[in-house]
Structure formats: structure tokens, C-alpha cells
Image (cartoon, coloured by chain):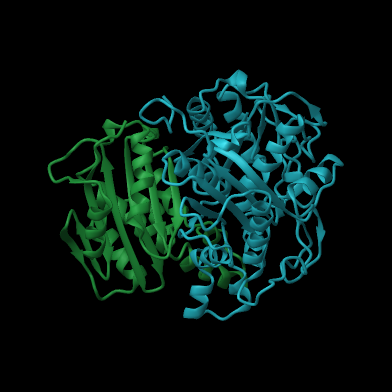
Amino acid sequence: MGDGMNGDNKITHVFIVADNVLSPLGKTTAENFSRLKENQSAVKAHHNPEISQQPFFASLFDNDDFLPTNPKYTRFEQLLIASIEDALQNCNINAADKKTILIISSTKGNISLLETETYSAELKNRISLPHSAQLVADHFGFVNKPVVISNACISGVLAIITGMRLLKSGQYENAVIAGADLISKFILSGFQSFQALSPQLCKPFDQSRDGLNLGEGAGTIVLSTNEKYKGNLKVKGGSVSNDANHISGPSRTGNELAYAIKKTMGSAGLSTSDIDFISAHGTATVFNDEMEANAIAIAGLKSAPINSLKGYYGHTLGAAGLIESIISLKSLQEGLVLPTAGFEQTGHGTAVNVVAKQLRIRANNFVKTASGFGGCNAAVIIGR
Amino acid sequence: MLSEKYITASCTIGKGIVNKNGIKAFENSNADTPGFLLSLYQHFKLNYPKFYKMDNLSKLCWLASEILLKDDFKPHLYQPEQVGIVLANANSSLDDDIKYYASVKDVPSPSLFVYTLPNIMIGEICIRNNFKGEHALFVQEEFNAGFIETQVNYLLDNDLLEACICGWGDVLEQDYKAVLFLVEKEKGEQSLPFSKDNMNSIFISN
């Protein structure tokens, strides 16, 4: 018995109605997917002393992108607004409907204000994530208070799961789920202090992987339980777990992410043979990819094709779960799994099936996984 | 499908006062935030060296969870994946963000950076207690008991969890407040029905 079954055993389906990926590779999902098919990556070398003394590899917008159209918005808010706007333009969901909820996912929001403003009571208010979320909600006329999720790198996947659950519970009929993060000195210096960054283009799952690249972007997904969307792809299940091991390093076994993957398959009523590919977290750090490969094998999915998109986008933090889920659902629709940019040769104890070239398949379901600081893990299944 | 759910324990910490299950358990109104948190740790004779590495937010929520669970939680009743945590706050990790950014001007500190995410407080409670279940960190302007109620209800009604710690934990400089509830399916001696109204009454009591 999965979650979301109501009294008469009727399953509430959660349909995907619209989406947007907004990144240095393009302003719409279609633009992004088109560039990815041409093997374009947004990760490049940057020399920007405002962010870092040393050069670094990352996927960044040009500074002029997403300049606020209105002085009351920051660049972060403008980025969210632009992404949500494109998604909403492509569907009939009414933001002002009381059955519609806005969910925002971000790890650090307006944190760059600490770099440019002196700390004060006004700054405390301006830097607040719920404040940003409310500004964005008001821009579109959402009548419900937005839900704000800030749960490290699983935020995007957790936002999709939270939206799915709010819809399955019947409290809302539609969910607009948007996530974004921008890269600032605050964030880059932190990852540098952890020695987590690769000095080159990152190599997910590769034997010589040496760290991650950071990235900027936004993703928006619109969900609805309205049966008029029957035939659309669905969010079928999701699960969250904690390693209970270490706050900044992942579990050595991968058992807890495996548990989340298995619970997700169970709640979706699917078995391992129903999973056609996996969109992994694949940050290209030594520890994450090792843990994740173990988790995938423990969950019984070691032969499923897996990819990581972080070689194209970098790690987009609060947007990652959304951007990568959307690109993966496009992959499912087009029957084309993208290769793992940066990967050449397998480099971890457990053998998993990393996609190295464009793969044409007939796919019905994929799993998106994510893990983050604080020992958190999440998995979600999207499918026909 | 719908389970009976109970608040089987509660802990509030704010303005120098700690209450457990509605009864004052400790008071120290003369300390600043770090001093108060240390005095709490010492008063309850806790022994957990990781405490000293935590930022104020994690210290506050970890302490609240220790007091919450003491004498009221029976770990042997649950598998690790059956216990989870749903928390919210208003200021995210800003208290530590400010300290981290100050270190950036000198030498960026990884031990400060790791706490610049509000969900780390959940991670610290999970590590201490071997809780491996569902969890989430929401940021909201003020405690939204109705929202927390629906999140926890969903998790327990759908058997995604059998027990959940939920509530609020927020710190910014000299202001701090933690209100944690232990929610279980079995009624205990002092239990209250799990509801937004019961959470709100306890929330405003400190």
C-alpha cells in the first residue's frame, strides 16, 4: 500500500504539467536539451577576483543576465521569477488559485548580500529566504504563503517530493516548484576550504575524479492532480533518509541512500526491472560517487544506465534536483539518455553502468537521486 | 490509514528558560547565547565532545533534543529508519553565516562553513541518536504549526515514520528559541493529542 491512496483505493496521480531549466546553457528546457545533445557544457575556467583569488572551474551566468527588472528584486529573485514565468507561460495553471501552492528550494538565497551590505536589521530581513519567496509569490499573485525548503543539496529533490505529497494529501491541486542558487565568494570559498573543488572540469564516477565544479541555475516544475493531464509524465514516488554518520562526509556504505531508493520504488509500486535509467547526484568527489555507486548496487540497480549531469551544469546546489530531474524527464520523453560529461573510465569499488555515450532507449521510468551535507539523501521516481 | 498521534514529550528553550513537558527544568537568564548553551550542556551533565564543534544553532537544537528524549523516548521500540525529524526556522543558518563570512576575510574556515546550512542541526540529532528516517528543514517567517502538522501527519499516516521529532529551532545572535515535540503513535502517560493547537499552546508558553 503506497502513500497517497485514499479511502476507496484510488491512487491520486501527480502529473507534470510544465517545466523550465534556466542556466548558462539556455533560458528554456528545450534550449538546454538541444545544447546538451550537442555535448555543450557550461563549465569553464573563470578568473574573477570578486569570487576567488585563484582561478576556478564553474558554470556561471554572465553578470548581466537576470539583472532585476524591478529594483525591489535581487538577482537571485529575478532568476527565480524568470524561470517560473517561462514554466507558467506554458501551462494553464493559475497562480492565484487557492488550490495552488508555490514551493521554493535554495541553499543560500541572497547570501551574497553579506558581501556587499553592512549587517543590520534591514539586511537580516532582506537576506531572509521566506522574504525572497514571498516577493516571488507576490509577483505572480500566489494567494498561499510559499513553502521554503533549505536542506542542502537534496533541496530540489525534496521540493519535488514535498509538492507530490501536498498534492497527494488533497490539500492542493497544483504545485509550482522552483529552485535556484547563485555562486558567490561566500559559497566558493567554503567549498575551497573543504578542498572539494576540482582544479579542472569535473569527472563524475571516473577513476581520476578529483572534486566538483559549482554552477548557477534555476529549475521550475509544475505539478497537478487534475485528471485532464492524464497521459502526462508523473511523479510516482519519493523518499528521504539520513546517514546518521557525519555532517560533511557521506555514509561509507551507501545503505541509507539505497534505503531511500528502495522505499521510492516500493511507494511507486515498481521493481528494479521497471527502472530504465538513473540520474545520479554524481558530484565527482571521491567519496560521493563511491557511496552512490554502492547505494545503487545495494538497491539492485547496478545494471541500470546511470549518468551525472554535473559535467555540463556544475553542482547547482538548491537548483540541482530540479534542473537534473527536468533534463532527465526530457531524456525519457525523447528516449535519449545523455552521457556523463567528464567520465572516461570507471573508478570505484562497485561496478555500475555509467553512460559514456548518448544512449537511445525506450524508457518508462527513471530514478533521480541526491545526497547532501548533514547526511541527507533523497530519491524520486518520474515516469509514464 | 489515519493513525492516532500524540505529543508524548515537549521541550522549549527560550529567554534563559528551559521547560520539559511544561515544567521548568533550568534557568539561566544572565548569559549570552553561547554562555547559556554551555551552561545547559553542563547542567544536564551531557557528555558528547562533538558538542564543542557545533555552531549555536546546532547546539541549541541538539540540546533541546537531548532534553526532549531523556526519560521519554524508548529507542528499542523503533528501527533507525522509523524515526525522523521535521524542523523549521526563520533565520536559516544566518547566525553561523555571519561568522563564516568574517573568517573569509582572513582564512575561510571549513569548520564554520559546514554549519552554513540550516539542516545540519537535523544531521547532528540524527548522528547522536542513529535516526535514519525521513526529515526536512523548512524556512518560514514564524512557526507555522498547521504546516508542520500536515507534514508530520502525512509521514505517520502513510507509515513512512513511526515517530517524529518536529518543531522549531532558531538562533540569531542573542535571540534563540527551540520548541521540539516528540510525536508517536502510542499514547503515553502525559500525552496530548498531536494537533496544531496543542503545538501552538506549548510554543507560546515560553
If the image is split into quadrants, where does the N terminus of chain B sit?
Answer: top left
Q: Is residue A44 left or right of residue A212?
A: right
Q: Is residue A198 left or right of residue B121?
A: right
Q: Residue furthest left?
A: B189
Is there any visible trace of residue A173 in the rendered image? yes
Q: Where is B35 relative to B54, above or below?
A: below
Q: Residue at x 48, y 39 (%)?
A: A240
Residue A9 in which image quadrant: top left
Q: Where is B58 relative to A118, above or below?
A: above
Q: Where is B165 relative to A369, above or below?
A: below
Please state which of residues A71 and B163 is positioned toward the viewer in this rendering. Answer: A71
Q: Residue at x 23, y 70 (%)?
A: B28
Figure chain in cyan: A
Residue A141 in which image quadrant: bottom right
Q: Is residue A229 left or right of residue A330?
A: left
Q: Residue furthest right?
A: A38
If the image is split into quadrants, where does the C terminus of chain B sit?
Answer: bottom left
Residue B41 image offset from top left, x and y in percent: 29, 59
Q: Residue at x 64, y 62 (%)?
A: A81
Q: Residue at x 63, y 24 (%)?
A: A275
Residue B96 image offset from top left, x and y in percent: 49, 66
Figure chain in green: B
Is there any visible trace of residue A291 in the rendered image? no
Residue B193 image offset from top left, x and y in percent: 20, 45
